[in-house]
Image (cartoon, rainbow, N blue to C red):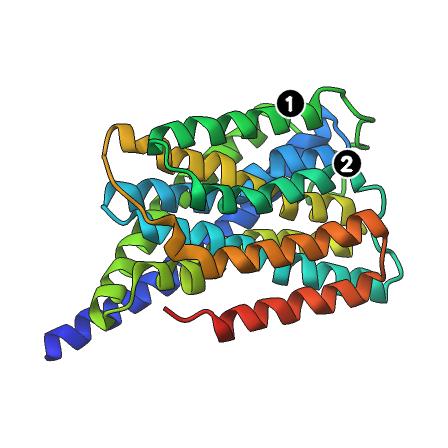
């Protein structure tokens, strides 16, 4: 019994530490990506949707790869769906409340409203589909590619570059190769951290007899979504509400197309079967939060009120969804 308890404590410490490293290193990578985007030049909406959203979804991608290879595909899907509820309920909710108090509620995001609606419908479609898993994966990856192309086909006005100051107060211009190396280094650390997070989460689920869906949707999803929350808060401080909002919404689409597509496509190499209907409670909250945000983007409602509704919806998700 003692060894069992000590093993559980080790797993808990490993999980918490891995999630903390995921959050910290992801922020480091995000800052480097922000430098890189200023050198390449796209609008905040395009960069947030097509670039930062993919970077901030890296933890979910790494969790998916290691979870599937470890025979725990349900853990990954629970993480992806739970992350989507967290992204809109907490990340966008906090952003909207903050923007409302600052009277700077972002406008002009109507072009991604339909993409948000699409991302919320995808899980519902998966419930009724009966085609082979790998074909679903191919279809999801195709949707991701088309969405990214649609958003970035026309290069937008270039963001004003910033400079870093040296210790002597002199401006140091940004460097593409160095910035790219920072992104690569951070991504490697994310991969290692995600590997430890998945293995410890599986151990904890087994020790308590908890379903993998529970661990993925209610625990791991928070850890892998912390980069989106951190970026949104820092972007809000800089007044880049479009960047933060597009990132959170884009991350949802990345989760449900790019990453979920990778999970399903991997069945070609490591066959597995998943009853997607077992996720129906989480999918319901994915749809609710998405519809609330879609309504706000299309009707331009009160920013602060929408933020409060989204936060309360996430609280309800944690309280109601029990496996």
User: Is 239 on the left-hand or right-hand side of 77?
Assistant: right
Image point (34%, 40%), residue name: 65
- As helix, strand or loop, the secondary structure at mark 1 comes to helix
Q: Position of residue 76 (x, y in %)?
A: 37, 49
Dot placed on the residue nearer the N-terminal end, 1 or 2: 2
Q: Position of residue 189 (x, y in %)?
A: 40, 44
Residue 282 x/y as whole percent? 48, 59
Q: Residues within 10 Å of mark 1 (few under 14, many from 20)?
A: few
Q: Residue at x 73, y 64 (%)?
A: 307
7 to the left or right of 242: left
Pick the front one: 248 or 196? 248
SS for tag 2?
helix
Mark 1–mark 2 Cα distance, whole angstroms, equals 13 Å
Q: Out of 285 and 105, give the one closest to the viewer.
A: 285
Q: How many marks?
A: 2
The residue that disc 2 covers is 111
- Residue 80's x, y, as percent? 46, 49
Say if residue 163 shows up in the picture: no
In front here: 311 or 117? 117
**Figure quadrant of residue 70:** top left
Residue 149: mark = 1
| In the depicted structure, whether residue 198 falls above or below residue 36 | below
**Residue 62 image label:** none
| Residue 298 vertical position relative to residue 178 in the rendered view, above or below | below
One can see residue 316 in this view: yes
Question: Residue drawn 77% across and 32% down?
Answer: 43
């Amino acid at each position: 019994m003692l060894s069992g308890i000590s093993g559980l404590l080790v797993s808990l410490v490993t999980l918490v530490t891995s999630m903390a490293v995921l959050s910290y290193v992801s922020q480091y990578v995000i800052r480097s990506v922000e430098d890189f985007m200023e050198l390449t030049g796209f609008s905040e909406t395009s960069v947030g949707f097509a670039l930062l959203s993919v970077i901030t979804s890296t933890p979910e991608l790494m969790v998916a790869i290691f979870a599937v290879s470890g025979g725990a595909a349900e853990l990954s899907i629970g993480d992806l769906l739970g992350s989507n509820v967290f992204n809109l309920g907490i990340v966008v909710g906090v952003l909207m409340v903050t923007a409302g108090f600052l009277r700077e509620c972002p406008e002009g995001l109507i072009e991604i409203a339909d993409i948000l609606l699409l991302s919320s419908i995808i899980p519902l479609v998966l419930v009724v589909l009966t085609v082979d898993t790998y074909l679903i994966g191919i279809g999801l990856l195709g949707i991701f590619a088309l969405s990214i192309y649609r958003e970035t086909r026309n290069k937008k006005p270039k963001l004003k570059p910033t400079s870093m100051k040296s210790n002597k107060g002199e401006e140091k211009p940004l460097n593409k190769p160095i910035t790219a190396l920072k992104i690569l280094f951070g991504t490697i650390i994310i991969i290692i951290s995600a590997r430890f997070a998945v293995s410890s989460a599986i151990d904890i689920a087994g020790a308590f007899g908890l379903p993998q869906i529970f661990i993925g949707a209610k625990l791991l999803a928070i850890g892998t979504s912390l980069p989106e929350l951190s970026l949104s808060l820092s972007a809000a401080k800089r007044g880049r509400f479009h960047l933060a909002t597009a990132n959170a919404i884009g991350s949802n689409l990345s989760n449900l197309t790019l990453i979920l597509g990778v999970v399903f496509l991997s069945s070609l190499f490591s066959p597995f079967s998943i009853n997607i209907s077992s996720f129906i409670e989480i999918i319901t909250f994915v749809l609710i939060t998405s519809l609330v945000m879609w309504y706000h983007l299309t009707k331009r409602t009160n920013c602060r009120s929408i933020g409060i509704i989204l936060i309360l919806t996430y609280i309800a998700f944690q309280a109601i969804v029990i496996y």
